[in-house]
Image (cartoon, rainbow, N blue to C red):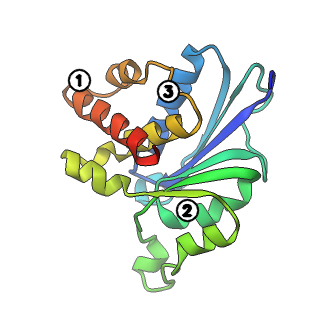
C-alpha cells in the first residue's frame, strides 16, 4: 500500500554489532529510494548493556521513533532482549531471535537469574517467531562477529528487501579484509529464515 511506513526494531547488547547492522540496513533502504529515519539508543553498550536501534522507512517517514505496538519486525540479537521489547510489535508483527543467552551484569553478580523459557514466552504471546542460531553459524564461518550481518540478511529476506545490492553495501562498509566473510554471513542469514 502506497505511503505505508514500515518499522524494524533491532535489539541486543553492547558489542554485538546491532548499530552496524542498522546502519547497513539504512544505507540499503536509502539507495532503494525510501525515506528512512533511524534512531539508536546505546545504553551501557560498552558494558554489555542493552542497545536498540529503530529503522523506519517508506515514502515519507515523519518520525524515527517506533511507538508501542508499531514495529513490523523485532530482530533480537539476544534472547532475553526479545521479551523486553515484545510490546513494540504490531499484532501482525513477527520476530527473528538469535538463539543466544548473554548474562547481564545483575545476573553475573548473582542478583538475578536468566529467565527460563524465553522462546516459549514469545510464542505464548502469539508472535510468529523465527529462532535462528546466528552466533553458532557465524562461528562456523570462522568469525562470530559476523553474526550481525547474518541477522541483517535474515531481516532483508523476511521484509522482502532482497532486491537491494546488499553484497556491495556490505563490502563498502566493513573492513576490506573481512568483506568476503561478511558477504558469506549475509547469504547465510537469508538461508536461516528461508
Q: Residues within 10 Å of mark 2 (few under 14, many from 20)?
A: many
Q: Which residue is mark 3?
A: 162
Give above or below for 188 relative to 85.
Answer: above
Quadrant of the rendered structure where residue 185 is? top left
Which is more foreground, mark 2 or mark 3?
A: 3
Q: Residue at x 46, y 46 (%)?
A: 193
x, y percentage for residue 102?
41, 67
Q: Residue at x 55, y 62 (%)?
A: 81
Q: Residue at x 42, y 39 (%)?
A: 190
Q: Residue at x 32, y 28 (%)?
A: 174
x, y percentage for residue 67?
78, 47
Give above or below for 2 relative to 151.
Answer: above
Q: Which residue is mark 2?
A: 81
Under tag 1, what secondary structure? Answer: helix
Asked if the residue under mark 2 is in contact with the one under mark 1, i.e. CB atoms within 8 Å, the reply is: no
User: Tag on residue 176?
Assistant: 1
Which is more foreground, mark 1 or mark 3?
A: 3
x, y percentage for residue 18?
47, 44
Q: Which quarter of the image is occupied by the C terminus? A: top left
Q: Nearer the viewer, residue 140 or 20?
A: 140
Under tag 2, what secondary structure? Answer: helix
Q: Earlier in the sequence, mark 1 or mark 3?
A: 3
Q: CA distance from mark 1 to mark 2?
A: 31 Å
Asked if the residue under mark 3 is in contact with the one under mark 2, i.e. CB atoms within 8 Å, the reply is: no
Q: CA distance from mark 1 to mark 3?
A: 23 Å
Amino acid at each position: 500500500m502506497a505511503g505505508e511506513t514500515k518499522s524494524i526494531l533491532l535489539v541486543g547488547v553492547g558489542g554485538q554489532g546491532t548499530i552496524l547492522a542498522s546502519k547497513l540496513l539504512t544505507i540499503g533502504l536509502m539507495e532503494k529510494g525510501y525515506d528512512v529515519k533511524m534512531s539508536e539508543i546505546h545504553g551501557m553498550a560498552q558494558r554489555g548493556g542493552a542497545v536498540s536501534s529503530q529503522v523506519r522507512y517508506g515514502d515519507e517517514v515523519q518520525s524515527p521513533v517506533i511507538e508501542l505496538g508499531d514495529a513490523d519486525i523485532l530482530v533480537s540479537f539476544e534472547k532475553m532482549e526479545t521479551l523486553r521489547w515484545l510490546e513494540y510489535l504490531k499484532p501482525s508483527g513477527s520476530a527473528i531471535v538469535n538463539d543466544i543467552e548473554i548474562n547481564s551484569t545483575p545476573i553475573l553478580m548473582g542478583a538475578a537469574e536468566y529467565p527460563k523459557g524465553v522462546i516459549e514466552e514469545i510464542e505464548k504471546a502469539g508472535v510468529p517467531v523465527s529462532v535462528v542460531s546466528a552466533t553458532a553459524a557465524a562461528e562456523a564461518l570462522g568469525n562470530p562477529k559476523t553474526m550481525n550481518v547474518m541477522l541483517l540478511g535474515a531481516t532483508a529476506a523476511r521484509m522482502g528487501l532482497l532486491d537491494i545490492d546488499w553484497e556491495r553495501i556490505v563490502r563498502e562498509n566493513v573492513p576490506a579484509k573481512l568483506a568476503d566473510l561478511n558477504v558469506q554471513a549475509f547469504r547465510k542469514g537469508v538461508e536461516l529464515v528461508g
